[in-house]
Amino acid sequence: MQNKHKIVVAITGASGAIYAKVLLNKLQQLQSPTNINSIEIVSIVMSDNAKDVWKFELGNTDYEKLPFTIHNKNDFFAPFASGSAKYDIMIICPCSMGTLGRIAAGISNDLTTRAADVILKERRKLILVTRDTPLSLIHINNMKTVTEAGGIICPASPSFYSQPQNFDDLAATVIDRVIDLCGLTQVTYRWGK
């Protein structure tokens, strides 16, 4: 019997709310009882800026309609604030450079950075979907630090070889990579097939 994944998704105030939307929609589909993936729970934490950016970029608050629990950014009683809850995957999407910097420095000043700290100390999977350009040397060094600590930097750099037809399809070229990094099974475009 395979283990059931417990996933936390953190959404920061970086531009790119479409990536978070596509990720949450795909996780909802992958969690369905008819899917072969074994996802026990998906929990969400959003910063205030993330909610503002979502509303500005997407024109809605559809994140409230998803069947996932949304935790307050300062709720240190959320299960994934402790390693004992055994969340095994954390995705920060999109990940601001400020959040990256706090994680790299070990600063746990909110639920997102505390959960990332927990995931790293427990040697579990942390995926940061960074969304900024250009990068300063500080950003690059922070990415190096997080990578050396076991995290995965997955920049929101869409690909075009699948010939995406709209913005959601384009965002999915990044999110499908994230889903693959999580070890979840999905049907998606594969090069050479």
Image (cartoon, rainbow, N blue to C red):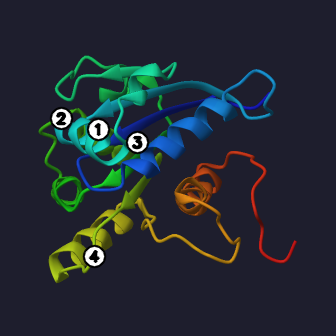
Q: Estimate the spatial distance between the alpha carbons at disc 1 and disc 2, rounded to whole Å.
A: 11 Å
Query: At 45% across and 51% down in the image, what residue appears?
Result: 19
Q: Which mark is residue 144?
A: none
Tag nearer the camera, 2 or 3: 2
Q: Estimate the spatial distance between the alpha carbons at disc 4 and disc 3, rounded to whole Å.
A: 31 Å
First of labels 1, 2 by sequence position: 2
Task: Give the labeled residue for mark 4.
Answer: 133
Task: Give the labeled residue for mark 3.
Answer: 122
First of labels 4, 3 by sequence position: 3
Comparing 169 with 77, the one in front is 169
State left or right for residue 174 relative to residue 98: right
State left or right for residue 116 relative to residue 35: left
Which residue type does callout 1 highlight?
Lys
Other residues around mark 3 within 10 Å, as few (<14) / some (14–19) / many (≥20): some
Q: Secondary structure at mark 4?
A: loop
Query: At 15% across and 76% down in the image, what residue appears?
Result: 138
Tell me the quarter of the image containing the C terminus. Answer: bottom right
Task: Give the labeled residue for mark 2.
Answer: 48
Q: Secondary structure at mark 1?
A: helix
Other residues around mark 1 within 10 Å, as few (<14) / some (14–19) / many (≥20): some
Q: Are marks 4 and 2 in contact (CB under 8 Å)?
A: no
Which residue type does callout 3 highlight?
Glu
Which residue type does callout 2 highlight?
Asp
First of labels 3, 1 by sequence position: 1
First of labels 4, 2 by sequence position: 2
Q: Could you tell me residue 128's position as x and y percent?
A: 39, 56
Q: Estimate the spatial distance between the alpha carbons at disc 4 and disc 2, rounded to whole Å.
A: 22 Å
Which residue type does callout 4 highlight?
Thr
